Image (spheres, grey):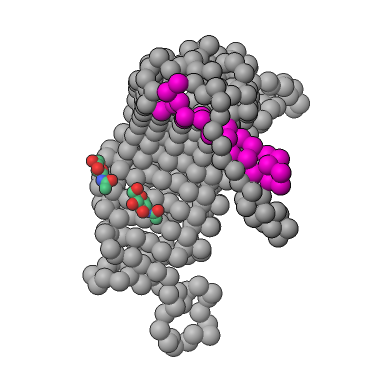
């Protein structure tokens, strides 16, 4: 409560002012807030300035840098260095022609939390290219990536440390360091790439994952293993998707929204597909090939509130009408899915 009051007070003192020494072709703004303008950050907008804009000198306390729509082809090691870059928290490189990112291109951006590389021509990312950055949000949508390996976030040449367990006369290698994955990555957008399978993201704390518009043909039992923090999963417009294996979502106990819309090749779903989705509230199956649902679907989805089955056809969890023998019924068994169109087979 007191934090909220403080924020309000600070916002009343928000001052926006122009910056001297702003690079020609860019637009710079300082936002100061807090009593006596005690906090400030600088936004530098160089979008549409042309391919020669980078490397661009930026003011010392720059937080946001927008380099979108500049026809940049390669992110070189020296492009994002110099004073100002060490304080960047957000970098927008979207809508360029980037097909190559040099190994150390981002290595100076120690505070970078948000990186937008969407709408470029990336076919692959070298291992370690995002290592050491505290990235929370990464947008790689609309590129040509065929895979995304977790080692892009890890130091190059860094072997997973193992210890050897020789108890019981058996030698087993035990992986010791679960912290190898990016500990802050909450949002990952990979829509519109060339991914043929779900990338292995095991154990990262991602909450929002978008894999729309990829040529993924099937979803396997371990596709989403260990993604227990996932809240929103978007898997729509996967033209090759024909099957989702039972138990595919079983680790996703915090998932609230599952979007499977516009998967026309997906014609059936077994009840076991939904096992483990204890928090799922919304399931979108609109414009998919699935026309009927398992009639015991509710028993697997205790938190479900709404299913969208076709365009404008929604189903809700409701209580059954008066029943005989109500007192001997199990909890939940008096709930049914009610849809706002007739002819839905449940
Ligand atoms: C549905 O998916 C197809 C590809 O399978 C795509 O061309 C179309 O734009 C998608 N429609 C919507 C509404 O996303
Ligand atoms: C699912 O995705 C489609 C296409 O992006 C969107 O229109 C729809 O609102 C989404 N559904 C939910 C429940 O978020």
- Tell me the quarter of the picture where residue 181 sits: top right
Q: Is residue 111 magenta?
A: no
Image position, residue 296 (x, y; %): 41, 65
User: Could you say where residue 298 lies in the image, as x and y percent from the top left?
Assistant: 44, 65
Compared to residue 232, the image places residue 321 above or below, namely: below
Q: Residue at x 39, y 69 (%)?
A: 316
Residue 160 percent across, percent down from the top left: 64, 21
The residue that appears at 66% across and 30% down in the rendered structure is 179
Quarter of the figure that contains the C terminus: bottom left
At 50% across and 44% down in the image, what residue appears? 208
Q: Name the image quarter holding the N terminus.
A: bottom right
Q: Is residue 238 left or right of residue 68?
A: left
Count of marks placed on residues:
0
Residue 237 falls in image quadrant: top left
Q: Is residue 198 visible?
A: no
Nearer to us in this view, 40 or 132: 40
Q: Magenta segment, which residues?
A: 24-47
Q: Residue at x 41, y 45 (%)?
A: 234
Please state the horizontal and vertical placement of residue 238, each as a whole percent of the image. 31, 40
Q: Nearer the viewer, residue 53 or 89?
A: 53
Q: Is residue 5 visible?
A: yes
Q: Residue furthest right?
A: 167
Given residues 193 and 267, the one toward you in this image is: 193
Q: Is residue 97 above or below residue 7?
A: above
In front: 298, or 280?
280
In the rendered structure, the answer to whether residue 243 lies left or right of residue 159 reads left
């Amino acid at each position: 409560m007191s934090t909220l009051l403080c924020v309000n007070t600070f916002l009343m003192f928000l001052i926006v002012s122009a910056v001297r020494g702003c690079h020609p072709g860019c637009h710079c703004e300082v936002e100061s807030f807090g009593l006596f303008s005690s906090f400030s950050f600088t936004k530098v907008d160089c979008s549409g300035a042309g391919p020669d804009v980078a490397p661009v000198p930026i003011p010392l306390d720059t937080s946001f840098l927008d380099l979108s729509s500049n026809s940049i082809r390669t992110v070189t090691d020296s492009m994002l260095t110099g004073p100002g870059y060490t304080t960047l928290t957000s970098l927008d490189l979207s809508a360029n022609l980037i097909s190559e990112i040099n190994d150390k291109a981002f290595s100076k951006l120690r505070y970078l939390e948000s990186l937008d590389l969407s709408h470029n021509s990336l076919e692959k990312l070298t291992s370690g290219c995002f290592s050491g950055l505290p990235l929370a949000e990464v947008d790689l949508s609309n590129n040509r990536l065929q895979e995304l390996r977790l080692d892009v976030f890890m130091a190059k040449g860094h072997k997973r440390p193992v210890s050897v367990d020789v108890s019981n006369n058996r030698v087993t290698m035990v992986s010791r360091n679960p912290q190898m994955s990016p500990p802050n990555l909450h949002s990952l957008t990979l829509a519109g790439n060339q991914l043929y399978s779900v990338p292995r993201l095991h154990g990262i704390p991602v909450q929002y994952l978008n894999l729309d518009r990829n040529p993924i043909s099937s979803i396997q039992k371990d596709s989403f293993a260990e993604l227990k923090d996932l809240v929103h999963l978007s898997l729509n417009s996967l033209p090759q998707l024909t099957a989702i294996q039972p138990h595919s979502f079983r680790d996703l106990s915090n998932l609230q929204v599952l979007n499977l819309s516009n998967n026309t090749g997906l014609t059936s779903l077994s009840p076991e597909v939904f096992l483990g989705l204890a928090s799922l509230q919304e399931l979108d199956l609109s414009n998919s090939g699935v026309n009927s649902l398992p009639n015991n679907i509710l028993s697997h989805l205790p938190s479900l509130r709404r299913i969208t089955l076709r365009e404008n056809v929604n189903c809700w969890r409701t209580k059954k009408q008066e029943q005989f023998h109500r007192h001997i019924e199990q909890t939940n068994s008096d709930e049914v899915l009610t849809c706002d169109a007739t002819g839905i087979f449940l």
